[in-house]
Amino acid sequence: MTAPIDRCNDGSTRAPRLRRDMNLGTLAELPRGSRGWRATPAEQLALLKTDGHEAVQLWQPTADAVKLARDAGLGVTGICRALTPPDVDAIVREQRDLGCEITTLHVGHSFETDAEMDALAAAVLETSARHSHPLYVETHRGTMTQDLRRTLDLVARFPALRFNADLSHWYTGHELTYGGEFLERAGRLAPVFERVRFLHARVGNPGCIQTALDEPGDSLAHFRWMWQRCFEGFLRGAQPGDFLSFNAELLPQKMGADFWLHYAQPRADLAGDALGGEPSDRYADAERLWQIATECFEAARAAVAATPTAG
């Protein structure tokens, strides 16, 4: 059987690169005071194109949503949740046929046995190979990658797995700073970092999964450290045309009337301001995250170039 897809490739001769994409959850429920607020989704997509984004990621994309993004000159990637092995193939078939070039997955519900995790991992690899479609497992709470030790064991059993790194779920959920041991704890995650091919960008702290970028403490420096290691893993062995999709994913307090997420948590003392109490402008933060990521990527490129090739 054909091998599962490792890195995404745009068919060009460009040097391996970081691609500026965005998860559209970042634009959801933006207050009028945000630089990203526009009256219609079409206007928001036009802004993304103007600002240099190449693609957007849609949760459970529809034909209409894909067309709207394409009309704005943007590529499309997909995201969905797979609870059983057959779900994986069905999701990829649907998203591939809609025109999604990449799919990232929340896999499982976190209560799986090792055998059930193995069946899901095998389905991911087989489906990626069968459809020649990049398919990346997200590091996310409430899924089979929730537990760090079990995820590392899964990688040992299925080394061909590749990941979408949403690292605030681990940084906050597993308190990677516990005991002042960030470097020791994060260093143990190298087998995952080396396999990251897609990234959801936000910064959290030990007590909150999504924070403004100017908060005091070490969190932003820690995320820089982790992202650089992910980029180094991508760059080692990368070929011309390969890219890693970097997506700001800065989510609101809730979507619609009653879908509560509790990510951007409004402050009562700021309720009357232009951002409706949100602690920062999520669109402006997304722009800063891209600048930070490009710095990390160049640092990773230099680190890889300075590392002697084995053999």
Image (spheres, rainbow, N blue to C red):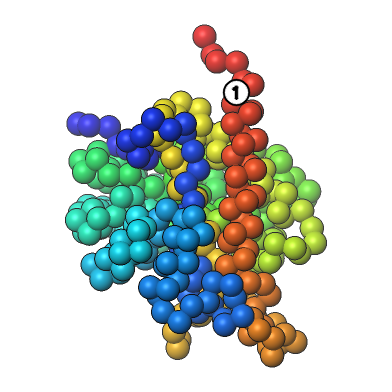
**Residue, disc 1:** 305
Marker count (numbered)? 1
Please give the name of the residue rendered at 19% of the width and 56% of the height, measured from the top-left corner: 97
Residue farthest to the top, as pictured: 311
Q: Nearer the viewer, residue 90 or 279?
A: 279
Residue 117, image x and y in percent? 37, 49
Q: Quadrant of residue 56?
A: bottom left
Q: Quadrant of the N terminus?
A: top left
Q: Nearer the viewer, residue 153 or 39?
A: 39
- 137, above or below 281, in the image: above
Say which element carries label 1.
helix
Q: Quadrant of residue 110?
A: bottom left
- 220, above or below 25, in the image: above
- Does residue 6 appear left or right of residue 234 in this picture? left
* Label 1 crowd bin: few (<14), some (14–19), many (20+), radius 10 Å: few
Residue 20, image x and y in percent? 49, 51
Residue farthest to the front, as pictured: 50
| Mark 1 residue type | Ala
Residue 44, image x and y in percent? 45, 71
Q: Nearer the viewer, residue 79 or 275?
A: 275
- Does residue 293 appear left or right of residue 126 in this picture? right
- Does residue 169 appear left or right of residue 71 in this picture? right
Please give the name of the residue rendered at 63% of the width and 63% of the height, measured from the top-left corner: 285
Please give the name of the residue rendered at 22% of the width and 32% of the height, measured from the top-left corner: 2
- Does residue 251 appear left or right of residue 307 in this picture? left
Q: Quadrant of residue 33?
A: bottom right
